[in-house]
Image: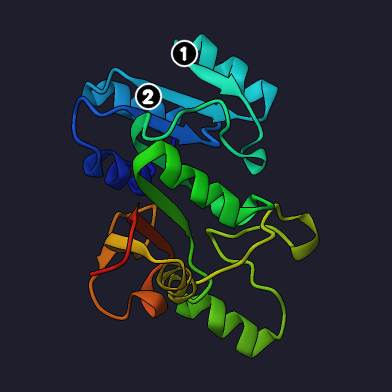
Amino acid sequence: MIRRFDQDIIVSLIPEGSRVLDLGCGSGDLLIKLKQKGTSDIRGVEIDDRCIAVCVRKGLTVFHGDIDEGLGDYDDASFDYVVLNQTLQVVHRPTLVIEEMLRVGNRAIVSFPNFGYFRIRGYLLVKGQMPKVDFLPRDWYDTPNIHLSTIADFKEFCRTRKIAIERLIGLRSCATGKTVKRFQNLLSQVGIFVITAGREP
């Protein structure tokens, strides 16, 4: 299994003992890492029945649900952290999903591929085609990605909706775990945001 440093970073951001909800949890890799850290109150939401079956075999608590329909089954502030890892770009209603994350969670962690990354910009400039790079390997007609955004786009999204950005981590590569301190929108493959409801200071 290829090590996912984006998941490692997310786990490091969540204090032990936190109540965590992972949206679009897939086969439960992030949930397993949280469980190994000692986080006991962890749950997932997933739409794919096959992934749910895998999670159940791993002993994880995962519920079937379409996050594009909201999180009506969960009360306000019922979790410390709600995670959306590498899923924002595939949801149909990203604004609703993020609003619901901030309603049911005290904090939300959102990560996504950064389409402002210099290799993507160069691919478009040189080839004039939708990019195919190591972390976005599919053709435009075969990709689940429907909402393409950059780190700069998400920062503006938060600003206009008075969502506070507590932390931004630019990840140069999920395969190496190298982070970016400057020019994050240009040099990061992935953006990882910790956000809360409320006006930015």
Callout 2 amino acid = Ile
Quadrant where the C terminus lies? bottom left
Of residue 170 and residue 44, the one placed in the foreground of this image is: 44
Numbered circle sitting on residue 32: 2
Label 2 crowd (10 A; few <14 / some 14-19 / many >=20) = some
Q: Residue at x 39, y 44 (%)?
A: 4
Count of labels in the image: 2
Picture layout, residue 113 above or below residue 54: below
State left or right for residue 173 relative to residue 88: left
State left or right for residue 15 relative to residue 134: left
Query: Residue 68: x, y in percent?
Result: 66, 43
Of residue 99 and residue 84, the one placed in the foreground of this image is: 99
Q: How far, Cα to Cα, is label 2 from label 1?
A: 8 Å
Query: Residue 150: x, y in percent?
Result: 50, 72
Quick check: can you spot residue 2?
A: no
Mark 2 near mark 1, Cβ–Cβ under 8 Å? yes
Numbered circle sitting on residue 58: 1
Label 1 crowd (10 A; few <14 / some 14-19 / many >=20) = some
